[in-house]
Image (cartoon, coloured by chain):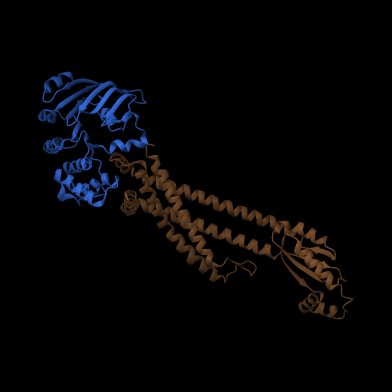
Chain colours: A brown, B blue
Amino acid sequence: MKLLRILSRNIRDSFKSVFRNFSLSLASISCITITLIVVSISIILSYNVNNFAELVEKDVTIVSFLNVDITEEGRQTVLAEINKLDNIESVTFESKTEIANEMMESSEVFANIMGSWTENESPIQDTFLVKVKDIELIGETANQLKKIENVQIVKYGEGMVEQLISIFDLIRKIGIVTVAALIIVTAFLITNTIKITIFSRKREIEIMRLVGASNLNIKIPFIFEGLFLGIIGSIIPVVATTYGYVALYENFKGQLFSPFIKLIEPQPFIYYISGALIVIGVLVGMYGSLKAVRKHLKI
Amino acid sequence: MDIIRMTNVKKQYKTGVTAIHDLSINFEKGDFVFIIGATGCGKSTLIKMIYREEKPTSGKINVGGIDVAKLRNSKVYKIRRKIGVVFQDFKLLNKSTVYENVAFALDVLGLPRDEIHTKVLKALELVGLKHKASSYPTQLSGGEQQRVAIARSIVNGPKLLICDEPTGNLDEITSMEIMNVLEEINKMGTTILMVTHDTEIVNKMKKRVVLLDAGRILKDFEKGTYNHEVVKNIK
């Protein structure tokens, strides 16, 4: 009961304190707001780049060409063998007739040449289109596919796919490092701003000690104050992210420059980002206050 | 019965300056004691060690059964809750009202709101400032601010009140008003230790007077035996 009373008083007092020291609070809040907006933009960018990379990676397909004279039974065996492999996401069969029709539809030249072929003359082979779970193991999976009986040729854009993977890997790493660095800089900036504002309240802390407040008694209101600063400071970034991203998404109709580069759908993406911003704001605010107040405590 | 027992206390600062030399003194419960001496004689260091703002280099300091010399920094609040301290510069929170300033000392103890309300009003009544409860310190005169500080220091009902030049910033009449309030508190059983430069006050009050010089006790006058002329010559 007593603990609850002390806690509720601390919450009330820290809330009051945010407004009583408004100009100082405003400095901390502005700092949190500005840095969180930068963090938000960098998270949105890095997630979208990541999303684009994932989409491209998902599109990569291994085409397994089957022997021309393969029987229906043989095809079933190949399919069963493919499904036995570990890294298989999906397998689609495309018959030579389907492929031929597609090609003829796509070009008149093809239609002219291919139209004269009988079924036995056609060099086109039945294929299995294989998508993999882990793109980094695509080479290995392709080799396993090659070993299956009746699979003649396996193609997946060797060389180019590996290059693409390494570029995306690099982009992802840069994204993570950038966001992490920004969060650290944010923490540093906010901590220092709060430190400066708390320095001017050294007297308050001195009086608290004087009237018999324990170190915990002194720390708690400042930690709550940091929490409130974090929450208030994250309001504008959260609103800007939510409305800004939805507007951006709608304005570009969900894609950037070409249908190939798709933006992440706003929902639930914006909720995750908003949650992350509030958590970062609150944690950094609390940490900043705690660190600043500890400086003035004799521990 | 002694409320403070100091035995062979020495305080040497990191700078190498020794403020208190092998000092032993006891203060009885209910006493009103003036600690006087020239600037730099160790008066402030002496009382700072009692409320554990400073730690003695050696020796024992027992305050109301607590060995404050051994008290860790994180446990200092234990002694602070038993002692009231009043300063020359009042040390009030200017952004809080008079009521909030006094209630502050009880808030940290987690007392129920009703109990805080009753005790704060009682303390403010004792110092004659009940009607200024909702004013801010900056709206008060120096004397009134000091009375708020006194109310804050006694609201918790401490057995010991330490005053570090409480009248240093006040004129003669206001100073005497403050002294009357302190005497009133002393009559209610609170021991008062007061550091002062003001020999006029010491002359008028006729209490026990401890005269310090270069960190040592030069004279310890029994109640009313303080002789202004003697002190003047010693200085």
Please tell me which residue is depicted at 58% across the width and 60% down the height of the picture: A47
The quarter holding residue A250 reads bottom right
Vertical arrangement, residue B76 with respect to residue B107, above or below = above
User: Quick one: quadrant of the C terminus of chain B?
Assistant: top left
Across and down, in percent, residue B122 comes to 17, 46
Is A45 left or right of B137, judged from the image as shown?
Answer: right
Is A90 left or right of B165, judged from the image as shown?
Answer: right
The quarter holding residue B31 reads top left
Out of B229 and B78, give the one closest to the viewer: B78
User: Quick one: quadrant of the N terminus of chain B?
Assistant: top left
Across and down, in percent, residue B127 comes to 15, 43
The answer to whether residue B42 is seen in the rendering is no
| Identity of the residue furthest to the right in this view | A121
Out of B73 and B146, give the one closest to the viewer: B73
Is B111 left or right of A103, judged from the image as shown?
Answer: left
Please tell me which residue is depicted at 16% across the width and 25% down the height of the picture: B209
Across and down, in percent, residue B14 comes to 37, 26
Out of A10 and A55, give the one closest to the viewer: A10
Please tell me which residue is depicted at 79% across the width and 78% down the height of the picture: A101
Vertical arrangement, residue B138 with respect to residue B82, above or below = below
The answer to whether residue B228 is seen in the rendering is yes
